[in-house]
């Protein structure tokens, strides 16, 4: 295991943890198609995404989600997509041939019926409803995605950079608090050996008060002291807490998606320190237990924002 010196994160080349909080923006324009993507990320137990995009481009929603989920493991992400299409619209004019012939036939019959000369030009026919239909050419969604993908990539890159920077700060804070806990734990270790003798003295004094001037059975006292000391021993809890601190260091150095691992580990550490506090009931150890619990609580709050 690599030892860290001081309250700082690993140096260049080491993996760091990522925060779930961040913001990224991407902007790209090509041939009149201008697309802006903004991504906002906050902490969440799982990965959750919502895409805000114009209704006419809803078919791209799953592509946005699929791209982002390959880069982000946890967090609630809001993805805002703004598409400005400044391109010249391509239109087609469609002639309804059957309708033209129907108009022509009806007009000829009308002229013959009232016995007037029939005169009808192309311009006249073109004025009739629905003879000429103007249709906008269907948009190629792949052209839109080509531009959107570039804007999205830029936005995700900026988001990940910010999450990494925030993660580095969390890492620094965790290393500092881990160092403080280790320091307090060492003080508890130094205090542990004298607990047995103090327990023996307290028991002897209490029994002496009860028995007044009567003799105390030293053998019986020694047995009671041993039994009480075994029930009050905090050695196992200290060893486990020590091991948990080593595991925390290893997790922080490993990096990746470690938020849940850290949360679970902190729960175990809190359980051990609570047991130490209840077993020891010592004026020297009790304040140290309070300090460790305070550091663990601060770490627990921070861990909720780790990916």
Image (cartoon, rainbow, N blue to C red):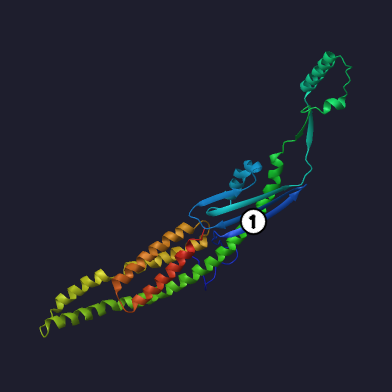
Judge whether residue 3 can be spotted in this image: no
Of all residues shown, which one is farthest toward the left? 214
Q: Residue shown at 64%/43% (left/top)?
A: 55
Q: Residues within 10 Å of mark 1 (few under 14, many from 20)?
A: some
Of all residues shown, which one is farthest toward the front? 114
Residue 295 in which image quadrant: bottom left
Depth check, front residue: 231 or 95? 95
Q: Which residue was labeled with disc 1?
A: 157
Depth check, front residue: 200 or 153? 153
Height in image: 163 above or below 198? above
Residue 14 in which image quadrant: bottom right
Left or right of 209 on screen, residue 232: right
Judge whether residue 302 can be spotted in this image: yes
Q: Residue shown at 60%/48% (left/top)?
A: 51
Depth check, front residue: 276 or 108? 108
Left or right of 272 on screen, residue 96: right
Residue 151, image x, y percentages: 68, 51
Height in image: 176 above or below 160? below
Residue 203, image x, y percentages: 20, 78
Q: Residue shown at 77%/20% (left/top)?
A: 98
Left or right of 171 on screen, residue 247: left
Residue 189, image x, y percentages: 36, 74
Residue 262, image x, y percentages: 45, 61
Residue 192 in which image quadrant: bottom left
Q: How many marks?
A: 1
Left or right of 218 on screen, residue 69: right
């Amino acid at each position: 295991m690599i030892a860290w010196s001081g309250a700082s994160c690993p140096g260049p080349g080491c993996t760091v943890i990522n925060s779930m909080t961040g913001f990224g923006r991407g902007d790209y324009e090509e041939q009149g198609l201008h697309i802006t993507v903004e991504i906002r990320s906050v902490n969440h137990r799982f990965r959750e995404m919502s895409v805000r995009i114009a209704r006419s481009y809803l078919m791209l929603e799953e592509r946005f989600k699929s791209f982002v989920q390959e880069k982000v493991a946890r967090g609630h992400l809001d993805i805002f997509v703004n598409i400005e299409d400044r391109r010249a619209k391509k239109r087609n004019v469609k002639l309804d041939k059957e309708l033209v012939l129907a108009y022509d036939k009806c007009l000829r019959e009308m002229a013959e019926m009232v016995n007037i000369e029939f005169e009808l030009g192309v311009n006249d026919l073109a004025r009739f409803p629905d003879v000429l239909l103007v249709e906008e050419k269907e948009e190629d969604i792949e052209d839109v995605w080509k531009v959107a993908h570039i804007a999205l990539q830029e936005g995700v890159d900026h988001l990940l950079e910010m999450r990494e920077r925030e993660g580095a700060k969390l890492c620094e804070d965790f290393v500092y608090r881990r160092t403080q806990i280790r320091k307090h734990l060492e003080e508890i270790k130094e205090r542990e050996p004298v607990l047995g003798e103090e327990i023996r003295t307290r028991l002897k004094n209490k029994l002496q008060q009860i028995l007044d001037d009567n003799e105390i059975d030293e053998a019986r006292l020694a047995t009671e002291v041993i039994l009480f000391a075994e029930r009050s021993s905090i050695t196992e809890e200290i060893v486990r807490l020590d091991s948990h601190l080593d595991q925390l260091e290893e997790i922080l150095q490993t990096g990746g998606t470690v938020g849940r691992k850290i949360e679970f580990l902190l729960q175990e550490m809190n359980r051990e320190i609570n047991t130490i506090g209840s077993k020891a009931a010592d004026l020297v150890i009790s304040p140290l237990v309070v300090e460790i619990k305070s550091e663990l609580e601060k770490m627990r709050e921070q861990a909720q924002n780790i990916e």
